[in-house]
């Protein structure tokens, strides 16, 4: 080849490059491109997410016969709130709330069509115990209000169970959790008793009185109540915030008919398999009665909860005024419709015969509900995944046919390089937000998004976007390929993302995760666009193919934003009560990265259609830096008064430790702090609150049994807790452990005790030395499955009689006057019926207005026997 020919080829390549550059859009169009997607989010996603029906008022009831009336439920909720916090064992819970509910049920009875229905009310007083994780939960005299509604002509012995709880957390009136669902059930009951159309199966309305005590009320009903065995399906109603739409976040396996009925009859569907898998993973530090009904009662059903505004959850601000009436109407419409459907379901006769594993389900922007079985999902995933790979392969073959002097081998090599860079981009899409979370945590700036949620755009979403496209942008600009048109190269980057999704869906299907339906949605819409382009020849006409792709990306973009926005709305408040032991920003960063990957995985690659794409990414980097500066300013301070508070949980505690001879070896008083979020008590340092002497409980664990920690429920986080010594005693009230009898034989020793104290107590049991517990009056299964120290939580409602128990140990032969057993008892004086000491009252008064304190007096007594 002559020098002149070489120059002509070079000139030809330069001209080709110039022509392609002219076809590429100017860089200043890129902001409009990015703002387009942001506009779609605010114009479509947010309105659809927040869409609620208009509330029906009592005056309009004649025009809406058979419909749920939100105003009546609101009036009941207002009366429920006036009772105040409803802690198990308190008069407010055991007397006033029970009387309120029984009175409301009797009012409903007066409206009942007595010619069609029978209404029975049973006030259950239940006592029992069960293993609850690493703890044994015991209850005594817990009250449940059980209402049975049956059509007189019904011959069915199968009942539908609808459950909510009427107790609340200390200091919270519980108007959202779970007052909203209590009044929804009352209005649903009312609508059912006045209906002119009888239903086939009976309905049990369970108002349980001890959910906040570790699901004790539900356990008492399902294991002991006379009607429990007849319950064949469940609707469990919970609240994780105050308001919003009611989310179906959990269902039972092997009962596809439940989801079929939900699809047909839920008026405002709101559900996702992703929420179910997140919940069942244990990431969310909470539980519902659904767990007891499913695991103990083997009862199939649905777990439904309102989850918006979780900032007020379990606080004094969970009040009537923050609960929208339209939210009550939304939930009421759904539950009333589902109740009517399930109460007439033929499947309720033989629920045991159904099967086919778990379901894949989701609502699409609240417009319609999609449901299919796990088996169908496996088939769909495999078929769509393989078809996507075939379409990509055919597209690459077309590129070789349309490009001069380009072989299939060259195309394959280029595509593999692009595929590798796309995988790297996916990794960076997740890792850059996680890096931001780590850096903010290292600088003691976690939770900056807690109130100012919009900060996540700059802190996590923009870095995820940059990471997603950066490898390919550098490749296209630093190593340009003049043998293949730029339009084809952009197509190949989208194809690579499709291949990543296809491989991901096959892997996740093999692992058994059902949230892989997200990949399925992406592949269907992109595969459809690719098929249209191949058939219409737009595939080979410059950038025209991008119009089809962009149009078909609008719906999946909106869905993924809708889905992850829902998850973030749930998780933002949770990060403020997730404890000090882990960085909650990692969860938010990961969710933002995943949202960016799914919502913009294809659209983001179009950044390389614009000229100077590196400048565009640099601009996004500058915006990220600006957001970081805002986040570390006062704007990023996490807490706000009444709306998004800092949670503090502490117990004003007296501690008394006895030796083997019964003498007091040590006694002191202090505040035991359970840190609710990553920042601990650091935000209070400059607020004037006296925290002098505050220290970690870790050193206490080397000196005292169970660290001397008056922990409530579980005690796993006691080493991360804080202890603030006090000079004065708290004197909360009496908790007495009395040794009734000690019996020794050749190789055993038996202790019999009597415990008296407040309605909430803990018992810690630890054998000493070579002694081994062989028998006790508690659950034998728990003794055999859990290692010491044994943690027992005991609470009582209406029955305050003493707890008598025995512990029998196997002791080494020949040892007599030596310690065999170490016991700790904690009395929790939880409700406001117990007076706080003056020092605590002043301490509470000194707290900033952005702090909500869940607190109560407690006493820890340690013994050696």
Image: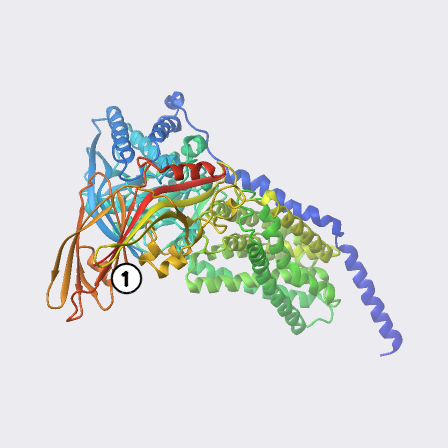
Location of the N terminus (image quadrant): bottom right
Q: Does 473 sit above or below residue 839?
A: below
Q: Residue furthest bottom?
A: 1
State how the image is colored. rainbow
Residue 375 in sight in this render? no
Give whichever of 663, 258 is nearer the camera: 663
Q: Is residue 176 above or below residue 374?
A: above
Image coordinates of residue 539 in percent, x first then y, are: 66, 58
Binning the other alpha carbons within 10 Å of mark 1 as few (below 14), some (14 to 19) or many (20 upward) gives: some
Taking 596 as reference, is 707 left or right? left
Viewport quadrant of the C terminus? bottom left
Q: Nearer the viewer, residue 251 or 76?
A: 76
From the image, tell me which residue sits under label 1: 788
Residue drawn at point x = 66 percent, y = 60 percent: 470
Q: Is residue 178 visible?
A: yes
The image quadrant that residue 431 belongs to is: bottom right
Looking at the image, which is closer to me, 82 or 727?
A: 727
Q: Residue at x 45, y 36 (%)?
A: 845
In the rendering, at what x and y percent does residue 488 appear? Answer: 68, 62
- Say which quarter of the image contains residue 326: top left
Classify mark 1: helix, strand or loop: loop
Vertical side of 810 occupied by 190: above or below: above
Q: Which sits in the foreground, 113 or 856?
A: 856
Place of residue 552 in the rendered image (x, y in percent of width and height, measured from the top left)? 59, 50
How far from the left and from the top, in percent, is residue 764? Answer: 27, 55
């Amino acid at each position: 080849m002559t020098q002149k020919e070489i120059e002509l080829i070079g000139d030809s390549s330069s001209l080709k490059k110039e022509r392609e550059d002219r076809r590429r859009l100017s860089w200043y169009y890129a902001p409009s491109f990015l703002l387009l997607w942001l506009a779609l989010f605010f114009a479509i996603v947010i309105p659809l997410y927040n869409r609620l029906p208009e509330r029906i008022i009592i005056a309009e009831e004649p025009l809406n016969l058979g419909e749920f009336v939100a105003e009546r439920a609101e009036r009941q909720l207002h009366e429920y709130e006036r009772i105040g916090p409803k802690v198990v064992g308190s008069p407010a819970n055991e007397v006033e709330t029970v009387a309120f509910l029984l009175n409301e049920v009797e009012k409903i009875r007066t409206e009942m069509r007595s010619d069609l229905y029978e209404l029975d009310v049973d006030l259950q007083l239940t006592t029992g115990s069960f293993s609850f994780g690493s703890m044994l939960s015991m209850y005594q005299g817990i009250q449940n209000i059980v209402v049975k509604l049956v059509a007189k002509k019904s011959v069915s012995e199968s009942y539908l169970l609808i459950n909510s709880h009427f107790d609340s957390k200390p200091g919270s009136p519980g108007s959202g959790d779970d007052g909203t669902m209590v009044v929804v059930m009352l209005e649903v009951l009312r609508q059912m008793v006045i209906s002119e159309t009888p239903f086939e199966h009976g309905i049990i309305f369970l108002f349980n009185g001890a959910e906040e005590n570790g699901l004790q009320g539900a356990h008492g009903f399902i294991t002991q109540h006379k009607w429990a065995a007849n319950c064949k399906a469940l609707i469990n109603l919970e609240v994780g915030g105050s308001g919003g739409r009611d989310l179906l976040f959990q269902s039972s396996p092997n009962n596809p008919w439940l989801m079929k009925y939900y699809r047909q009859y839920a008026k405002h569907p709101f559900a996702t398999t992703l929420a179910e898998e997140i919940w069942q993973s244990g990431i969310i530090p909470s539980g519902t009665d659904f767990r007891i009904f499913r695991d103990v009662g083997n009862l199939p059903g649905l777990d439904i909860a309102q989850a918006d505004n979780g900032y007020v959850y379990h606080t004094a601000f969970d009040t009537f005024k923050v609960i929208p009436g339209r939210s009550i109407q939304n939930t009421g419409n759904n539950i009333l419709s589902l109740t009517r459907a399930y109460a007439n379901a033929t499947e309720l006769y033989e629920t045991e015969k159904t099967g086919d594993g778990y379901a894949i389900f989701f609502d699409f922007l609240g417009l319609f509900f999609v449901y299919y079985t796990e088996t169908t999902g496996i088939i769909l995933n495999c078929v769509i995944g393989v078809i996507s790979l075939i379409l990509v392969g055919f597209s690459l073959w077309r590129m070789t046919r349309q490009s001069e002097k380009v072989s299939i081998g060259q195309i394959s090599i280029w595509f593999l390089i692009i595929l590798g860079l796309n995988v790297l981009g996916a990794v960076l899409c997740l890792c850059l937000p996680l890096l931001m979370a780590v850096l903010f945590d290292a600088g003691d700036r976690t939770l900056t998004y807690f109130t100012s949620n919009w900060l996540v755009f700059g802190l996590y979403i923009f870095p995820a976007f940059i990471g997603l496209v950066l490898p390919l942008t550098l490749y296209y600009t630093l190593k340009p390929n003049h043998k293949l048109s730029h339009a084809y190269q952009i197509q190949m980057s989208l194809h690579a993302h499709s291949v990543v999704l296809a491989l991901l869906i096959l892997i996740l299907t093999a692992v058994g995760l059902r949230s892989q339906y997200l990949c399925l949605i992406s592949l269907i819409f992109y595969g459809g666009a690719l098929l249209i382009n191949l058939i219409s020849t737009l595939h080979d006409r410059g950038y025209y193919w991008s119009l089809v792709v962009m149009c078909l990306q609008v719906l999946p973009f909106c869905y993924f934003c809708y889905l992850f926005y829902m998850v973030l709305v749930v998780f933002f408040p949770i990060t403020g009560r997730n404890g000090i032991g882990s960085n909650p920003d990692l969860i938010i960063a990961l969710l933002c990265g995943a949202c960016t990957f799914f919502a913009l995985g294809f659209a983001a690659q179009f950044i390389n259609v614009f000229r100077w794409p590196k400048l565009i990414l640099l601009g996004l980097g500058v915006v990220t830096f600006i957001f970081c500066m805002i986040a570390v300013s006062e704007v990023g301070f996490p807490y706000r008064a009444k709306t998004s508070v800092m949670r503090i949980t502490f117990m004003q505690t007296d501690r008394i430790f006895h030796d083997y001879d019964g003498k007091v070896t040590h006694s002191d008083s202090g505040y035991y702090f359970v840190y609710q979020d990553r920042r601990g008590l650091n935000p209070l340092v400059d607020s004037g609150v006296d925290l002098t002497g505050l220290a970690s409980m870790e050193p206490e664990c080397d000196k005292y049994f169970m660290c001397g920690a008056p922990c409530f429920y579980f005690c796993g986080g006691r080493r991360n807790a804080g202890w603030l010594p006090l000079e004065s005693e708290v004197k909360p009230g009496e908790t007495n452990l009395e040794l009734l009898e000690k019996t020794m034989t050749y190789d055993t020793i038996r202790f019999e005790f009597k415990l008296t104290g407040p309605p909430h107590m803990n018992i810690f049991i630890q054998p000493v030395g070579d002694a081994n517990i062989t028998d006790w009056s508690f659950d034998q299964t728990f003794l055999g499955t859990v290692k010491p120290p044994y943690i027992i939580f005991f609470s009582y409602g209406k029955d305050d009689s003493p707890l008598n128990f025995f512990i029998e140990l196997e002791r080494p032969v020949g040892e007599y006057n030596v310690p065999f057993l170490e016991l700790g008892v904690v009395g929790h004086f939880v409700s406001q019926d117990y007076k706080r000491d003056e020092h605590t009252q002043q301490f509470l008064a000194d707290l900033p207005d952005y702090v909500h304190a869940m607190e109560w007096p407690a006493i820890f007594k340690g013994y050696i026997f």
